[in-house]
Structure formats: C-alpha cells, structure tokens
Amino acid sequence: MPPANRPRLARRMADIAPFHVMELLRRAHELEAAGHDVIHMEVGEPDFPTPAPVIEAASRHIATGDVHYTPALGLPRLREAIARHYHDRFGADVAPERIIVTPGASGALMLALAATTDPGDAWLLPDPGYPCNRHLVRSFEGVPRALPVNAATRFQPTAEGVRIAWADDVLGLIVATPSNPTGTLLDATELDALRAAVRHRDGLIIVDEIYQGLSYGVAPHTALASRPQDGMFVVNSFSKYFGMTGWRLGWLVAPPEYVREIEKLAQHFFISPSTPAQHAALAAFAPATRDILEARREAFDARRHALLPALREIGFCIAAEPQGAFYIYADVSALADDSEALARRLIEEAFVAATPGIDFGDNAPRRHLRFAYTTDTPRLVEAAERIRRVVG
C-alpha cells in the first residue's frame, strides 16, 4: 500500500510537463515585488485593454440581472454573428449550426480531441509548437507525435512531411496559422495540400486559427474558405485579435456529423460558456470595435519592425520572419549554448523576460528563445539595449 499522504495520480501525469513560461512569469513578478523594472516579453497576451464597446456590451447585459446559463453550444445570436464574420471578412460560408462557443480556445481543442480520440490514437504536431496541444492530446489518452519542422519551411509542416510521418496509429494532424511560437503562416495552397494528405489517409485535421486577424503584409484567411471540409475542425478565440484574454471565450467549427456528439460533451464539461463574456463578444464584430482592433494590429506591426532589426544587430538569428501573431522565434546559438540558461541570465541581470525553447518541444529547443512583442515600442527598444549589455 502507498503511504497515506502520497497522491494517487493518473499515469498520464508523468507525461504532463509544467508550462515553463508561467514559472518564468512567477520569477518576473518576484523581481518586480523587489522593486525591479521587468520588461515582459514572455507571455503571449496583448497588452491593450479590452475594447470599450466590448466592455460596454457586457456591462449592459450584467445590469439586466439576466445572467443565467446559455445553451451548451453558446448563444444563438453569437453563433450567428461568428458565421457572419466568416462570410463578411473571409468569404467563407459557415453554417451557425457548426459553431460551438467554448471557454477559450483550449475548451474548443478539448472538445475536438475528446470527441475523436481513443486511447493510443496518435496526433501529429509540429515541433516547435504550442505546448498545451500535446498535453491535451495526452490528457485524452492520445499519443502526441512530434513532426519536426525548421526554418527551411518557415517552421510549418509540409504535405510531404505528413505523408512520411503518417503511420497506422495516426488519427490526425494539428496545425496552427499563424503559429505560436514562430508567428509564421500557412497559405491557402499549403493548407489545402495538408488537408488532402490527411484525408488521403482518412485522417482528421485540426486547424488552430486563434491568431487569425493578426497578420502583417498578408491578408488574413481561413481554412474554412476552401472545400471540401470533411474531417476538418477549426479552433478560434476571442483572446488574441479581439483582445479578450481574461474573458475566456473561443469557438470551434466542427463537421456537421460531430456537432451533436460535441454538444453532449460540452453539456458535461462546461454546462455553458460564460454568459457575460458571450454578450460582450457580440460587440467584438461591430465596426467601431473593428477600427480599434485594426489600429492595434498596425501597432503590433510597428513593434515587429522595431524589434526584428534590434535583435539581429545583437546577434540573434531570425531565419523565418514572423508574418502573424506577436512572436519572434530567435536562434541564440551565436550568443549562448543554452537558451534556458540565457533566459535565466536575461531576467536576473537585464530584467528582461523571454521564453526559452524548451516550452515548445524537443526540436532544437536549447537554440531558441521566443520574444513576444506585447509591450510598446519604446520598451522593446529598451529591452534590446538591456540584452545587448548582458550578452555584449
């Protein structure tokens, strides 16, 4: 018998790694509490406040006192608004009935995985990639299988790479455009080729579009604008482009034949998404809000243009420039042997927080740091100067 004070943890917990960026954030807060001025470039959270029209919409609804559960799939009005958004902005016809409103994009990915994944089913995931994806696959008894990618393909998978990596136990592929941590994009032709490679093996594909709208020099697009869409799930969020991180609201677009099954899971997992957040999100698509969001996108682009040359002048190598999101994935090998050690040095000596590559997979993680340009341009310039003084 195990000791009485020993936790009875599921075996899967041995495969769930901590989110290292959150540990780094904790240290940053400790340094700030001690009086140090820390420049935050570690957490992928827009620094802008929630747009005023969104806050006003939430306030109006809360004031009515009618803050009760909504249907498990989300407010019908919001599902219809998301469908109009796809039509008006991307020319994509998406039936509202296919849209499931969720507690954040993580809730959307959970539902897609829970509805499809049997124990032992493998999912191909680009490496480097967003760490939560592989841990959510493991949480539903799936097998996350790394698909190494590099700067030669802008850190995005290719159809040929998927064909080579496919095996009998593979259920599907998860891709992201724009990507975290690299900020790179898949164009429509590349997405079509990936989807065709997956469907040739009767597999599924989950397309993470949570940074959709945050693209620079390239018009944003969606995988939902092309056909066919069988076997394809699309995950999106109100957190990034819409600036609603703490509201914890996202959505999933599922093939029609999966919606009823996903509804059953949503009923049990969440009951319903946050009612105030859903009423707030109704204002996210208003023209006044869109003007605010586009101005912020332009500010992110200006930050990108300031930070890229500053990091290169220091000695970082950025072989695949970001065209979306708000991240730069930089090769540190000309400056240090170990990005984790460099990240610790930067936060302790320069009071600059950046995320080491160990959070994003096993593909050359010690060579890379992720910088988030989620603070204003003068602070980014100051951060670069502090880094320069430390690495000299």
Image: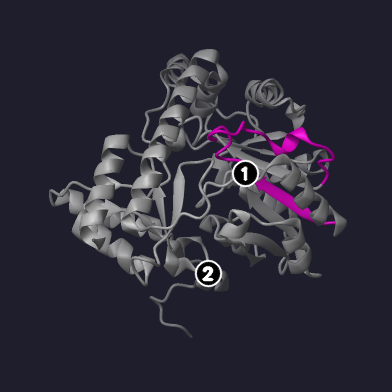
Measure how far apart labels 1 and 2 are at the Cα level: 25 Å
In the picture, residue 253 is in which quadrant? top right
Q: Nearer the viewer, mark 1 or mark 2?
A: 2
The reply, left or right, for residue 243 in relation to residue 166 is left
The reply, left or right, for residue 294 in relation to residue 228 is left
Pointer 1 residue: 108
Above or below residue 122? Residue 215 is above
In-front residue for pair 166/215: 215
Place of residue 379 in the rendered image (x, y in percent of width and height, measured from the top left): 27, 39
- For label 2, the SS is loop
Task: Please identify the residue farthest to the front as the structure is shown.
Answer: 313
Pointer 2 residue: 362
In-front residue for pair 101/2: 101
Q: Amino acid at mark 2?
A: Asp
Which SS does the magenta portion mostly show? loop
- For label 1, the SS is helix
The answer to whether one can see residue 311 in this image is yes
Measuring 60% from the left and 59% from the top, which residue is drawn there?
152
User: Total of numbered circles in the picture?
Assistant: 2
Place of residue 28 in the rendered image (x, y in percent of width and height, measured from the top left): 26, 53
Q: Which residues are magenta?
A: 202-230
